[in-house]
């Protein structure tokens, strides 16, 4: 159960606070409710506008800058690239840290930055599709920027099995030789524990023992600590400003990675986040980040282009399939009975090995058709049917 929750909750960058509609702008603000953070500008964590030049100069001088993201958002990745470029113009002495890859991928990243392998070879050597699963096209502009400017790329993550094993057994039960070099995490803050409890409870009935929840907190802390250690080591070994690309759930509220960095002696890291216009204004609680950048509404779909079929799930690599991280309310997936933690191993009788294969099958579905799915759960294998409506909606 806990290993499924690890995949389903905030560990992989979708831990933005729940979207409940656009709230009123903060008291005293002259912004309309739909723009508590002005598109194209920076604000602090209480929605007060900030001077772009001052903020970027502060970031360029910082030892560590943490750029949060939602992994499947093209807008978030474009914002990260633009922010990187701005920082580079002020401080070319940068390293770029990547949550996307484990430490074992470092030799491939070094060859890429040195210009000795191609894009295709990089993706093959890092086993990108299975290791990370999200579209490499989101990340390649950043990787190419690093290569063009000979900026070191640093693999921040550990193998997924370490986090999952911690959730099952607890950190103390894992022998030092199996810890992939990760040290003991600092005990998390009470605010972080509260947020993890809320996230765990939001995923319905399941294990609720004190021991199981403790292992869940330990697993998250180990993941945060592993990335913080790589960031801190890079900073100390190179004296470069480390700009880390990682999921929002690891940085919001200065919990997670920035909290572990402070325990490692780097207490002045900066957390910068993109701010989607649909996020509720009351999420700007004064501490969520050092600064947020307002994104604009997405362009409306082309009226001449039919919308693609949508299952209504967030996916990540799983054990031999596509693992469901979250399910949208009212979606095709919800109606079919898919749940966080499910691993889809077949669609229409065809084996599914990763998220991209399932996405490709779904996008081939015609309106009004039914798609049989085979999913693995802790209780065993189950057959479900996803029923797509006769009229697709964006």
Image (cartoon, rainbow, N blue to C red):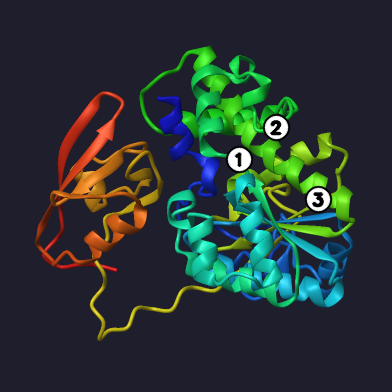
Question: How many numbered discs?
Answer: 3
Residue at the spot of label 2: 182
Residue 256, can we see it?
Answer: no
Residue 363 position, x and y percent, is 24, 65
Looking at the image, do the residues carrying marks 1 and 3 touch, with CB atoms under 8 Å apart?
Answer: no
Quick one: label 2 or label 1, which is nearer the N terminus? 1
Residue 275 position, x and y percent, is 60, 62
At mark 1, the secondary structure is loop
Residue 133, can we see it?
Answer: yes
Residue at the spot of label 3: 234
For the residues labelled 1 and 3, the Cα–Cα distance comes to 16 Å
For the view shown, which residue lies furthest in the front direction? 116
At mark 3, the secondary structure is helix
Residue 56, placed above or below residue 305:
above
Residue at screen point 36% across, 38% down: 340
For the view shown, which residue lies furthest in the bottom direction? 304
Does 306 sit left or right of 236 as displayed?
left
Residue 158: which disc? 1
Residue at screen point 33% across, 41% down: 320
Q: Which of 91 and 38 is in front in this view?
A: 91
Report which quarter residue 173 is drawn in. Answer: top right
Residue 387 position, x and y percent, is 13, 53
Residue 101: which disc? none
- Neighbour tally class for label 3: few under 14, some 14-19, many 20 plus, Cα within 10 Å: many
Residue 174 position, x and y percent, is 60, 19
Name the quadrant of the C terminus: bottom left
Looking at the image, do the residues carrying marks 2 and 1 touch, with CB atoms under 8 Å apart?
Answer: yes
Does 315 sit left or right of 185 as displayed?
left
Q: Nearer the viewer, residue 132 or 90?
A: 132
For the residues labelled 2 and 1, the Cα–Cα distance comes to 9 Å
Does 129 sit left or right of 280 as displayed?
left
């Amino acid at each position: 159960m806990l290993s499924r929750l690890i995949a389903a909750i905030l560990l992989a960058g979708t831990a933005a606070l729940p979207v409940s509609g656009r709230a009123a702008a903060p008291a005293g603000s002259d912004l309309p409710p739909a723009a508590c953070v002005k598109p194209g500008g920076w604000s602090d964590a209480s929605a007060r506008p900030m001077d772009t030049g001052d903020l970027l100069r502060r970031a360029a001088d910082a030892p560590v800058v943490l750029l949060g993201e939602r992994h499947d958002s093209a807008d978030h990745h474009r914002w990260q690239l633009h922010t990187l470029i701005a920082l580079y113009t002020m401080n070319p002495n940068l390293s770029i840290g990547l949550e996307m890859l484990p430490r074992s991928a470092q030799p491939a990243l070094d060859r890429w930055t040195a210009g000795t392998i191609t894009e295709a070879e990089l993706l093959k050597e890092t086993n990108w599709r299975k290791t990370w699963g999200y579209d490499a096209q989101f990340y390649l502009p950043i990787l190419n920027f690093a290569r063009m400017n000979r900026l070191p790329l640093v693999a921040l993550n550990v193998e997924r099995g370490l986090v999952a094993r911690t959730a099952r057994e607890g950190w103390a039960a894992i022998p030092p030789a199996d810890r992939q070099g990760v040290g003991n995490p600092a005990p998390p803050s009470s605010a972080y524990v509260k947020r993890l409890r809320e996230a765990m409870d939001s995923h319905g009935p399941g294990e609720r023992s004190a021991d199981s929840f403790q292992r869940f907190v330990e697993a998250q802390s180990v993941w945060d600590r592993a990335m913080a250690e790589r960031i801190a080591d890079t900073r100390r070994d190179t004296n470069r400003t480390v700009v880390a690309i990682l999921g929002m759930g690891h940085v919001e509220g200065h919990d997670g990675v920035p909290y572990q960095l402070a325990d490692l002696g780097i207490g002045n890291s900066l957390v910068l986040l993109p701010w989607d216009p649909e996020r509720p204004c009351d999420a700007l609680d004064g501490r969520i980040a050092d600064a947020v950048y307002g994104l604009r509404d997405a362009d409306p779909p082309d009226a001449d282009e039919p919308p693609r079929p949508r299952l209504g799930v967030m996916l990540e690599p799983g054990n031999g399939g596509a693992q469901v991280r979250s399910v949208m309310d009212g979606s095709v997936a919800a109606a079919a009975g898919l749940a966080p933690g499910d691993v889809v191993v077949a669609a229409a009788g065809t084996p599914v090995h990763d998220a991209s294969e399932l996405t490709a099958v779904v996008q081939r579905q015609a309106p009004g058709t039914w798609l049989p799915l085979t999913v693995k759960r802790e209780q065993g294998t189950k057959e479900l049917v996803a029923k797509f409506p006769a009229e697709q909606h964006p």
